Image (cartoon, grey):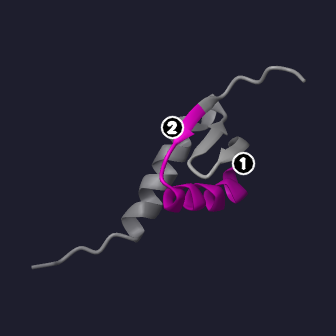
Amino acid sequence: MRAVKGTLLTCDPAVKQLILVINEQMVFVIEDLDETHLLIDPSMVEAMRIRLDDELEKNTYTLEV
């Protein structure tokens, strides 16, 4: 087994599932560790964060006055 450089990401299970869906297009997850942890490619952290923010914004209800 060889060492792999990665960033440990901790999140709730719902967000993790959303990240895994995004991963199908961008491929940044190195290892799915457990229900709340992922090891991701450190060079893709910012791109993943931007994409996740976009997806979460789509799923947020806003009241327009």
- Circle 1 sits on which residue? 27
User: Residue at coordinates 66% horizontally, 28% vertically from top-left?
Assistant: 6
Q: Give the residue type at disc 2.
A: Glu
Relative to 56, does residue 64 appear above or below in the rendering? below
In the image, 57: left or right of 55?
left
Magenta residues, start to end? 8-27
- Circle 2 sits on which residue? 46
SS of the residue under disc 2: helix
Mark nearer the N terminus (1 vs 2)? 1
Q: Residues within 10 Å of mark 1 (few under 14, many from 20)?
A: some
User: Residue at coordinates 59% horizontally, 61% vertically from top-left?
Assistant: 17
Which quadrant of the rendered structure holds the C terminus?
Answer: bottom left
Q: Position of residue 24 (x, y in %)?
A: 71, 58
In the image, 5: left or right of 16?
right
Q: Residue furthest front?
A: 34
User: Residue at coordinates 66% horizontally, 34% vertically from top-left?
Assistant: 41
**Residue 10 part of the magenta segment:** yes
